[in-house]
Image (cartoon, rainbow, N blue to C red):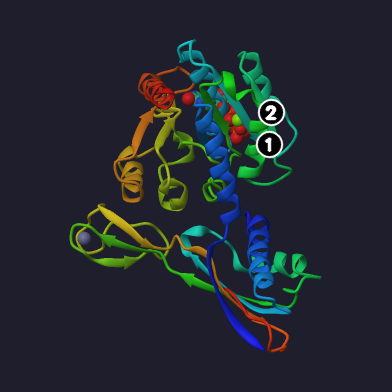
Amino acid sequence: MKQRVEIVKRILDSNEQLARQNREKLDAHKVFCINLMASPGAGKTSFILQTINRLPKHICLGVIEGDTAPVTIDSDKIMQAGMPVMQINTGGECHLDANMVGLALEELDLRVLDLLLIENVGNLICPAAFALGNHANVLIASIPEGDDKPYKYPNIYRNLDVLIINKTDLLPYIEFRMDYFQQGVEMLNPGLLTFPVSSKTGEGFEGWINWVEEKVHQIRR
Amino acid sequence: MHELAVTESILEIVLDSARKNQASAVTDITLTIGSLSSIVDDCVQFYWDHISQGTICQNAKLHFKRVMASLKCLDCGKVYSLIEELTPCPSCGSINLNIITGEEFQVDHIEITTEETGKHETTS
Ligand SMILES: Nc1nc2c(ncn2[C@@H]2O[C@H](COP(=O)(O)OP(=O)(O)OP(=O)(O)O)[C@@H](O)[C@H]2O)c(=O)[nH]1
Ligand SMILES: [Mg+2]
Ligand SMILES: [Zn+2]
């Protein structure tokens, strides 16, 4: 007998369930968690290091480093900055998923943390599809990547809470039409909170740091 | 790029539903995928042929229902599809837009065969 069965279920439903479990765990420990996405070399690690430098010392921060290979260059930098870091090797996978993050959460001492930053794998396509359970999605775009990225990778701009435009110190040397870039962003994610920064000079970080502090205080309440 | 993970999830959902419905085989699987999701059909098919081997989904046909991304202008009401590149409203130039389709990403329905015992009550 032949039969049709309706399913109507999101394809990544089981990942989304795991993400919800991660979220509950983070909430229970009052840890505000940020998923940092960007293309390779956009400055994720540099941005995290500046953030570590500038956050008030009473905020206790941890980092999860996603890497496709067991190379610890990024993790070592975070460790040198004195912060607890967990590295996830995705084994070639182009993104982190909720299961990998769940395993890392078991290794970190969430009781002492206020803030957890996740450096996702450098990629503008795949990380957008996989929920991790974090509270905020942040994309780090960078000037040398060009001003057309929102038009070419619309999906990743859709579910963002904050956009960082990094490497603003390079604006004098690179043709980057800020209006054109921001128009694309506006079409996909109207009113998106945006902080132009330089992770090299530290310029523009005040707004970002204030936003993070505010979020950490909110979750503790 | 993440087609393997996606294909594994499809198999998990389909097997789960097939089991609940006492299927002896799954013959067809229909997926609805919006054009914003950047999934390559051929690539999913490639992985599918491998990972469905030895399951009751082996030989099942994958059908991709593609949904074109469409936008609605919030200023003049024009609805237009996003074919290649994101553009402002073609009739009034506004960038005040809503994405109304294109983000779908689901397993829609499957076709199964069941043994004809006449006694099984199927639940779905
Ligand atoms: N001029 C300038 N260079 C920067 C800035 N931020 C990062 N860089 C440089 O960009 C390069 C890549 O920076 P990373 O922080 O390693 O970038 P990433 O996104 O973590 O890279 P992957 O983890 O390899 O994907 C390094 O050479 C940084 O020194 C910036 O604001 N200005
Ligand atoms: Mg890095
Ligand atoms: Zn219009």
Q: Where is residue B46 in the image (x, y as percent from the top left)?
A: 71, 67
Q: Position of residue B106 (x, y in %)?
A: 53, 64
Quick one: which residue is furthest to the top in this view?
A: A57
Quick one: which residue is furthest to the right in this view?
A: B54
What subunit carries mark 1?
A
Residue A43 appears in the picture as rendered: no
Q: In which quarter of the image is residue A206?
A: top left
Q: In which quarter of the image is residue B91?
A: bottom left
Label placed on residue A107: 2
Taking B75 as reference, is A113 above or below it? above
Q: Mark 1 points at which residue?
A: A103
Q: Are the residues flagged by discs 2 and 1 in contact, CB closer than 8 Å?
A: yes
What subunit carries mark 2?
A
> At 40% across and 36% down in the image, what residue appears?
A163
What kind of residue is marked 1? Leu
Q: Position of residue B7 (x, y in %)?
A: 66, 62
Q: Is mark 2 on a helix, strand or loop?
A: helix
**Does label 1 lie on the same chain as label 2?**
yes
